[in-house]
Amino acid sequence: MESKKILIVEDNENNLQLFKIILRKLGPEILVAKNGPDAFELIKSRHPDLIMMDIQIPGMSGIDVIKETRKLPDFAETPIIAVTAYAMSGDKEKILAAGADYYLSKPVNTRELPLKVKEILEGHENLEES
Ligand code: MN
């Protein structure tokens, strides 16, 4: 997974450090953004293989970043994991309708997260090989 790039979008410093520590162990390059506009710029300039997107971020909501990302021609298939702490009824549907592939609620299960990310990235590798 050394050649892969994961973008972590998270404005909470503690969560960000935690996600970085967990995902770095898988071996990919880790990119970080703490607000919506920076996330969207990094998506366009660095082309991550997987995006972990906090929904409550400053500047531009995670939902809007996901919607804009899906409009880009090269990002129709990029796996996006949405993460949110304040899920209200209908939120999950809204987030998935915006174009997220997966949905995690905070606090994120630190055992499941790396397994999920590994499964997603390896799944995509297998699709590309076949
Ligand atoms: Mn947040």
Image (spheres, helix red, strand yellow):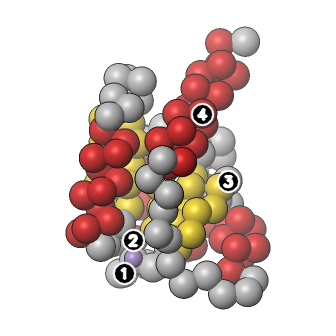
Disc on res. 59: 1
Query: What residue lies at 45% left-to-right and 79% top-to-bottom?
Result: 56
Q: Nearer the viewer, mark 2 or mark 4?
A: 4
Q: CA distance from mark 3 to mark 1?
A: 23 Å
The local crowd at label 1, few if under 14, some if 14 to 19, many if 20 or more residues have their Cα within 10 Å, is few
Residue visible at 66% across and 71% down in the picture: 95
Cα separation, mark 3 vs mark 2, equals 18 Å
The residue that disc 2 covers is: 36
Residue 94, image quadrant? bottom right
Which x, y percent locates residue 80? 57, 52
The tag earlier along the polypeptide, 1 or 2, is 2
Q: On the image, numbered disc 3 is attached to which residue?
A: 101
Q: Earlier in the sequence, mark 3 or mark 2?
A: 2
Pointer 2 local density, CA inside 10 Å: few below 14, some 14–19, many at least 20: many
In front here: 78 or 106? 106
Tags 3 and 1 touching, CB below 8 Å:
no
Does dot 3 land on a helix, a strand or a loop?
loop
- Sequence-earlier tag: 3 or 1: 1
Q: Residue at x 25, y 68 (%)?
A: 14
Looking at marks 2 and 4 on the same chain, the residue that comes earlier in the sequence is marked by: 2
* Amino acid type indicated by mark 4: Glu
Single out the mark in the foreground, 3 or 1. Answer: 3
**Which label is found at residue 119?**
4
* Nearer-N-terminus badge (3/4): 3
Disc 1 is placed on an element classified as loop
Place of residue 109 in the rendered image (x, y in percent of width and height, measured from the top left):
50, 57
Q: Quadrant of ligand 1?
A: bottom left
